[in-house]
Image (spheres, rainbow, N blue to C red):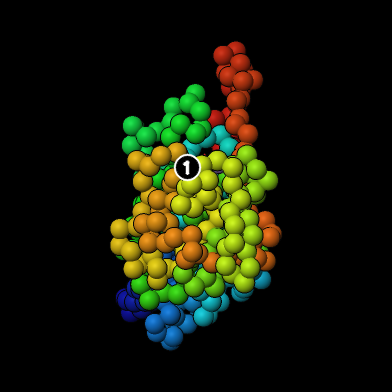
Amino acid sequence: MKLKLVYSLRLLFIANLFVFTMWSLLLVLKKDAHSNVEHSNLKNSDDKDTEKRINKLKKSLKNRYPSQLDYIEAYIVKDLPVIYAVTPTYTRWTQKADLTRLAQTLLHVPNLHWIVVEDAERKTPLVTKFLKYSGLQYTHLNSKTDANYKLKADDPNWLLPRGVAQRNAGLSWIRKNVPPSTSGVLYLMDDDNTYSLKLFEEMRTIATAAVWPVGLTGGLKFEGPGSCSGGKVLSWYTAWKPERPFPIDMAGFAVNLKLFFQHKNAEFSNKVPRGYLESHFLTSLDLTRDDVEGKVEDCSEILVWHTRTEKATLKQEAKLISMGNPSNPDIEV
Ligand code: UGA
Ligand code: MN
């Protein structure tokens, strides 16, 4: 009887030990998978190391999104330059709709690292959750616009520059976390534009810096390089402040990471005249109009549009709230 009890106790101990070991292993694996998705960069320095990291990342993505194996397989490609896309974003009723459209475009783009920077004191639960389930390789940051430079609710849009502190936070993150030997490009993506997939393949091969026209900007059909030949920009199409060093929208250029790393002080500034955000950044990279390559079918095709989402007023919602009949506050829009 006594022997039987000892035997059972020993068996119980072994079983517990087994469960504990498996549980710890699971926790370690889970933690590893999570940090991989958020912070993995593709280095081109050590091939073996890169391959290991790619396989690990693929595995963790597959575990999380078993129904989307096809795009995950095509998502990380060895030896393909990485696109580092920096997107400022801020809280408003249409934010999740804009982010959804953008993220679902980016899901089709291999080797893209999305750096999303919230204009907020703290990272919001909405964006945190959104990114977690986006299926993208991302970094989530926040940087609040200084009160002196923040637009008030009723200010016209053009009064102050937008997205400056956030883009700079994204640039600092790249400087600190991306190995300078990484082959890739930097692209500044606003959260409300419309991007064609073809554009991403065009920008991957940029030697130093490249430009292309952006649809529906500057009160024109498009603005930026107007005609190009063999990669050379022959003329610029613009109506407003044509004397700007680069009469172009933020979505109309991308730069090679090497050039970016060579210019340690290159950044955006709030203190420039209206319409000079892009010109200031490009000239801080020591670029002139003669240095930039004209891309996209000799600048003749529009692959990105400066669209804007109509502001939601929610007047009826306010009415129902005042009548004591608010909608379910747990529903996130
Ligand atoms: C145009 C250009 O396309 C922008 O790249 C440029 O930053 C802006 O003008 C400007 O002159 O500052 P526009 O559509 O007028 O864009 O600007 P928004 O789309 O309202 O803002 C640009 C980016 O900054 C967006 O990604 C937006 O989410 C972000 N933003 C806007 C903030 O982070 N905080 C704000 O308070 C407002
Ligand atoms: Mn916009």
Q: Amino acid at mark 1?
A: Gly
Task: Decide if ligand 1 comes within 8 Å of the CB at mark 1.
Answer: yes
Instruction: Estimate how packed mark 1 is, as few (under 14), some (14 to 19) or many (20 or more) residues with alpha carbons within 10 Å.
Output: some
Question: Looking at the image, which is closer to me, 233 or 90?
Answer: 233
SS class of the residue under badge 1? loop
Image point (48%, 26%), residue name:
155
Q: Position of residue 27 (x, y in %)?
A: 40, 66
Counting every numbered tag in the picture gives: 1
| Front residue (pair 111, 55) | 111
Q: Residue at x 59, y 57 (%)?
A: 235
Q: Is residue 56 above or below residue 240?
A: below
Is 177 located above or below residue 141 in the figure?
A: below
Q: Can residue 109 be seen at all in this image of the molecule?
A: no
Residue 209 in view in this figure: yes
Relative side of 331 to 302, left or right: left
The x and y percentages for residue 91 are: 48, 37
Question: Mark 1 — residue?
Answer: 275
Q: Which residue is at a point 52% across and 49% down the rendered structure image? A: 247
Left or right? Give the position of 183 relative to 75.
left
Residue displayed at 61% across by 50% down: 237
Instruction: Describe residue 305's horizontal placement relative to residue 241 as left or right.
Output: right
**As rendered, which of 32 and 177 lies closer to the eye?**
177
Pinpoint residue 117: horizontal percent, then vertical percent. Answer: 43, 49
